[in-house]
Amino acid sequence: MIERYTLPEMGELWTENAKLKTWLQVEIAVCEAQAELGYIPAEAVEEIKAKANFDPKRVLEIEAEVRHDVIAFLTNVNEYVGDVGRYIHLGLTSSDVLDTALALQMVASLDLLLSCVEELGQAIRYQAQQHRETVMVGRSHGIHAEPITFGFKLAGWLAEVCRNRQRLVKMRDNIAVGKISGAVGTYANIDPRVEAIACQKLGLQPDTASTQVISRDRHAEYVQTLALLTASIERFAVEVRNLQRTDVLEVEEYFSKRQKGSSAMPHKRNPIRSERLTGMARIVRGHAVAALENVALWHERDISHSSVERVILPDACILTHFMLKETTNLVKNLLVYPENMKRNMNVYGGVIFSQRVLLALVEKGMIREDAYQIVQSCAHQAWNQPNGNFQDLICKNEEIKSKLSEAEIAACFDPKHHLKHLDDVYQRLGI
């Protein structure tokens, strides 16, 4: 009896046993279609369904002798079903079973990934709500720029996760394709209606124009979609790593009571999850290159893609699934330090408010180039000085004082000005 699992871990979908189950599922669907069209007896199909089974160890034993995985599988199935086994695999070629069954595995994997993406999105959404007004410095080129909020940063993450979800949904349709078209795909020994009925039973669409295989551009797109998703995860992880640096320390991965960061230095609290995620994204990207190289097969088929897919498809799916789980855990338990954000934002006396001073002077009639030179001079005097204070220098500058009142200067250093339109972003995301 085929096991029914409700929320399997990704690894279960790619075991040898799971693969053979999908092969049997495809063979039975084809038999049912053949019977519906009157090509084989309906009672034979019922007997096949009642008796069909396999033993993974026995399949490997037979394969060691015949050197063909599908023949080994069919031989083992026939050991269970007996004479009616002659109706199994009628008019088919191995790739009819292999590619159609692989589509089922890939669809099941995507369904699990979509569930995990949803969980990650909810985790980010919650943190974005919590830190909607947690002010911090924005950075460009790694250098302090202008104020943002941590929630705004997370809103950008959420938007990216939503786009990745849309890509996965689209990819599910593109990969949910089967082929029951026989050798070289001409339907010479199988009715196209059998393919249509069997695919419908399996929840798939018939391939538009298969050769002996389903063209590998579909599979390459699948792995590239996962690579793009994991690249997004890497972006989030790199951000955490940068914000956790000792001299920044605005956020930090959760560090449990008995956790240890270094065998030599007891003080260490390292961003190990984020570093792990960064490394794993590199592996999935590498698999995307291999998937692209699988597209160019000889003529109507060769099997140069097969050995590659046995590695990259389970590996990419399992890695992506693990990365999503890890990232969700990371986001849910992220330690956020608003006081450190405030401290970093005001370093050197608020140089990050330089544009506000510049624009205020321009609005008062000062030539932009002149205003820029004055503000830049004050900023560079404060920059990287132990007691540098940009706001103090601005307040003491005679040319600026002749244009701006104390209240107008103070208004330039109010971070709320930079946050007044953040609600527009939040509304677009439904936060």
Image: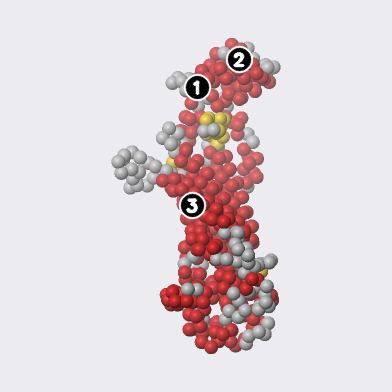
| Disc marking residue 283 | 3
Judging depth in this view, the residue of 428 and 189 nearest the camera is 189
The vertical placement of 6 against 54, above or below, is: above
Secondary structure under the numbered disc 1 in the rendered image = loop
Q: Is residue 200 left or right of residue 284?
A: right
Residue pictured at 63% horizontal, 41% vertical: 425
- Residue 281 numbered tag: none
Q: Indicate which label's residue lies in the foreground, 3 or 2.
A: 3
Label 3 Cα neighbours within 10 Å, binned few <14 / some 14-19 / many ≥20: some
Q: Along the polypeptide, which appears first: circle 3 or circle 2? A: 3
- Position of 287 relative to 339 (above/below): below
Which amino acid type corresponds to the residue marked 1 in the rendered image? Trp
At x 47% / y 76%, what residue is drawn? 66
Q: Earlier in the sequence, mark 1 or mark 2?
A: 1
Depth check: give the residue in front, 371 or 155.
371
**How would you rate the neighbour count of disc 1 (Cα within 10 Å): few for under 14, some for 14-19, many for 20 or more?**
some
Q: Mark 2 points at which residue?
A: 400
Residue denoted by label 1: 383
Q: Distance between the residues labelled 3 and 2?
A: 55 Å
User: Which residue is located at x 60 percent, y 62 percent?
Assistant: 297
Secondary structure state at the residue bearing disc 2: helix
On screen, residue 205 versus residue 11, left or right, reads: right
- Identify residue type, mark 2: Ile
Task: State the CA–CA distance, disc 3 to disc 1.
Answer: 41 Å
Q: Tell me where residue 312 appears, x and y as whole percent.
A: 51, 59
